[in-house]
Image (tube, rainbow, N blue to C red):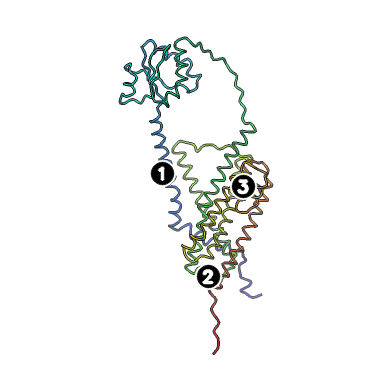
Amino acid sequence: MSEAAATRLSNWQAAWVIARRDFLAILFSRAFFFFLLGPLFPLVVGSLAGSIGGKVQQQAQTHVVALAMSPEDSTRVMDALQTIGPELDGALPALVRADGTDPKAILAEPGHAYGAVLSGTPSAPVLTGPDAQLARWKGPLSLLAASAAGEAKLRFAPMELDTVTQSAASDRSDRIRTAQAGQLLLFLLTMLLAGMVLSNLVEEKANKIIEVLAAAIPMDAVFMGKLVAMLGVSFVGIAVWGTAIGAFALASGHGLGALPEPALGWPLFIVLGIAYFAMGYLLLGSVFLAIGSLATTVREVQTLSMPVTMVQLLVFFLAAYTLTAPGSPLEIAVCIFPFSSPFAMLARAAQSGALWPHLLALAWQGLCVLIFVRFGASLFKRRVMKSGRSKPVRAK
């Protein structure tokens, strides 16, 4: 065995060298810093817009009704409100005694935001206001006025409450919501981050760096190393975004909304979510690498990658469609098809407590990654060798 053959790196060692090189080069670049900031701006703007919109909506839809009755009748209505209001659990609006007796003048009064005006007497009440407010408060205020007039002797019987935590129907409905949220997050992260593989390959191909690597290292190792490096960079980006979102939620004092617990439990569901993101990213990245071997310019990249993006979108919709039909032939086919398998199996993790299908699916997805990487590497190598082969010179 020659000295060169003895010191030659194995495929896995070469892939690790490429992965470490690309990971550090991208992680400490200015472009990656601005890439991390990109998704945070829409999040901040959307949160601020939602907060402002909520404030505006709260101001626009007031829950205060002006009470324009005589002092005696107003006192009786307010006493009735104290009696039956807690039992109606917020169905009654807040009542405020108004100055004056003309309902229209009270509604037009500047500086107040009354939704409606309750006038007349408890026996013959009159409610004045917009149609939406009248339809909303007609029934509760009629009941309140009848109670104040003594015409409705209300007595709320003590009721024993027997609460059940979950039922079969509510369990299934809640877990479907968790499955939908997991699929959507997985799809968004995969599509957002997988494009880095393509841009990195095209850039190195334009600079002839990839041809130097192809001459020194097997292309399978180059492709696998690039995929692993981009996957590591993606995890860094996800960690940064997750930390920023968590800090923003804690600073604002609002929770993000608790999703129902999946069938496998949150710890195992999160682990499987990370594994399926890795497999989905590697599968889509391997296709993008094959596309990069066919493209020579950024315009060609955009033209060739668009069909893949549209197909991936259709695959996501198909996986979402089979959520409500677990175990059906279509759902099983979606679980087997490599590019839809991560989405469908993550949904299964939310709805089913069986673990062995996930181990089988991850092994199948890993095998497909190796096959696609081998195919993309051979395609790229043929094109590079073809582009670098010179024509033979004929002797005269």
Amino acid identity at mark 3: Ala
2 or 1: mark nearer the eye: 1
Q: x and y percent of residue 396 in the render? A: 54, 90
Q: x and y percent of residue 222 in the render? A: 57, 64
Q: Mark 2 or mark 1, which has the lower sequence index?
A: 1
Q: Mark 2 or mark 3, which has the lower sequence index?
A: 2
Q: Which mark is residue 211?
A: 2
Q: Mark 3 and mark 1 in contact (Cβ < 8 Å)?
A: no
Q: Mark 1 or mark 3, which has the lower sequence index?
A: 1
Q: Secondary structure at mark 3?
A: helix
The answer to which quarter of the image holds residue 179 is top right
34 or 311, which is in the foreground? 311
Which quadrant is the N terminus positioned in? bottom right
124 or 309, which is in the foreground? 124
Q: Which mark is residue 6?
A: none
Q: Secondary structure at mark 1?
A: helix
Mark 3, residue position: 344
Mark 1, residue position: 45
2 or 3: mark nearer the eye: 3
Q: x and y percent of residue 117 in the render? A: 38, 20
**Number of residues whose C-alpha sits closer than 10 Å to that of mark 3, classed few (under 14), some (14–19) or many (20 or more):** many
Residue depicted at x 52% and y 59%: 305
The answer to which quarter of the image holds residue 380 is bottom right
Amino acid identity at mark 1: Val
